[in-house]
Image: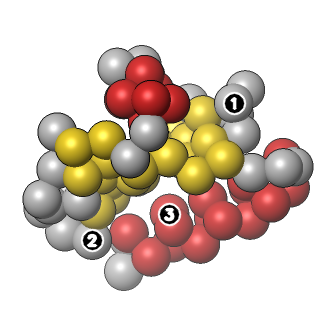
Amino acid sequence: MKYSSDMAERLFQETPDEQAGSVHELGWFGMFREEKVILTEDSQGFVDAEQFDTDEKLQEVWDLLALSSTV
């Protein structure tokens, strides 16, 4: 695994509140509500964490990612 930050590495070891997708398709996504973070992993093993300022923005981005992973 290749982590973009210490936070990405730490959260990757935890269970997300919600998850969607697959590394074999468009990528895997995990949402961590308390931290307001969406974690992503691509098919190359790169793990990235994006933190949001508000719960609303977190949910908005999550809804788009979850929808795109089911198409």
For residue 22, say whether it is visible. Answer: no
Which residue is located at x 50 percent, y 63 percent? 66
Q: Is residue 7 left or right of residue 44?
A: right
Quadrant (top left, top right, bottom left, bottom right) of the N terminus: top left
Q: Amino acid type of disc 2? A: Leu
* SS category of the residue bearing label 2: loop
The residue that disc 2 covers is 26
Residue 66 is marked as: 3
Residue 35 is marked as: 1
Foreground residue among 50 and 57: 50
Of the numbered discs 3 and 2, the one sitting upstream in the chain is 2
Which residue is located at x 44 percent, y 29 percent? 6
Q: Amino acid type of disc 3? A: Ala
Of the numbered discs 2 and 1, the one sitting upstream in the chain is 2
Whole-percent x and y of residue 37?
62, 42
Whole-percent x and y of residue 35?
69, 30
Which residue is located at x 56 percent, y 42 percent? 31
User: For residue 21, what is the image quadrant?
Assistant: bottom left
Real-space Cα distance between discs 3 and 2? Answer: 11 Å
Q: Amino acid type of disc 1? A: Glu
Real-space Cα distance between discs 2 and 1? Answer: 24 Å
Label 3 or label 2, whichever lies nearer to me, is 2
